[in-house]
């Protein structure tokens, strides 16, 4: 599973809209959309914000992509 698909799966499992997660992570909704659809890879600071907003570690996000 790609990083973007994993982030999307976690977001959907939590029942959170893309807009709400983007607000929580303090990033643009379009940025999150591009990440979820694997059109771009997040910078480290963005990845940290997304992990915090999803209440998971960066390690967990990256490990989930190997599954």
Image (spheres, rainbow, N blue to C red):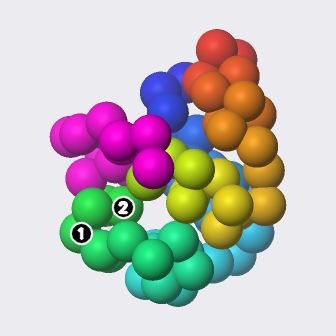
When the figure is inspected, residue 53 is found, relative to residue 5, above or below; the finding is below
- Residue at horizontal 35 percent and vertical 41 percent from the top: 43
Count of numbered circles on the image? 2
Can you name the residue that lies furthest to the top here?
A: 66
Quarter of image, res 55:
bottom right
Image x and y of residue 37, in percent:
31, 46
Could you tell me which secondary element the residue under label 1 belongs to? helix
- Residue at horizontal 47 percent and vertical 27 percent from the top: 2
Left or right of 1 on screen, residue 19 = left
Q: Quadrant of the N terminus?
A: top right
Q: Quadrant of the C terminus?
A: top right
- Residue at horizontal 25 percent and vertical 53 percent from the top: 34
Residue 35 visible somewhere in the drawing:
yes
Question: Residue under circle 1?
Answer: 30
Question: Residue under circle 2?
Answer: 32
Image x and y of residue 54, in percent:
70, 62
Within 10 Å of the Cα at label 2, are there few (<14), some (14-19), or many (20+) other Cα atoms? Answer: many
Q: Which residues are magenta?
A: 34-45
Within 10 Å of the Cα at label 1, are there few (<14), some (14-19), or many (20+) other Cα atoms? Answer: few
Q: Are marks 1 and 2 in contact (CB under 8 Å)?
A: yes
Depth check: give the residue in front, 45 or 66.
45
Indicate yes or no whether the magenta region holds residue 40: yes
Image x and y of residue 31, in percent:
27, 62
Could you tell me which secondary element the residue under label 2 belongs to? helix
Report, in whole angstroms, how far the alpha carbon at label 1 lies from the one at label 2: 5 Å
Badge number at residue 4: none
When the figure is inspected, residue 18 is found, relative to residue 42, above or below; the finding is below
Residue 17 visible somewhere in the drawing:
no
Depth check: give the residue in front, 56 or 9.
56
Image x and y of residue 40, in percent:
23, 40
- Residue at horizontal 45 percent and vertical 77 percent from the top: 26
Indicate yes or no whether the magenta region holds residue 38: yes
């Amino acid at each position: 599973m790609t990083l973007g698909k994993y982030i999307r799966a976690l977001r959907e499992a939590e029942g959170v809209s893309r807009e709400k997660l983007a607000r929580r992570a303090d990033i643009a909704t379009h940025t999150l959309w591009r990440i979820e659809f694997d059109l771009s890879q997040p910078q480290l600071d963005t990845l940290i914000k997304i992990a915090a907003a999803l209440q998971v570690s960066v390690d967990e996000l990256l490990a989930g992509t190997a599954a």
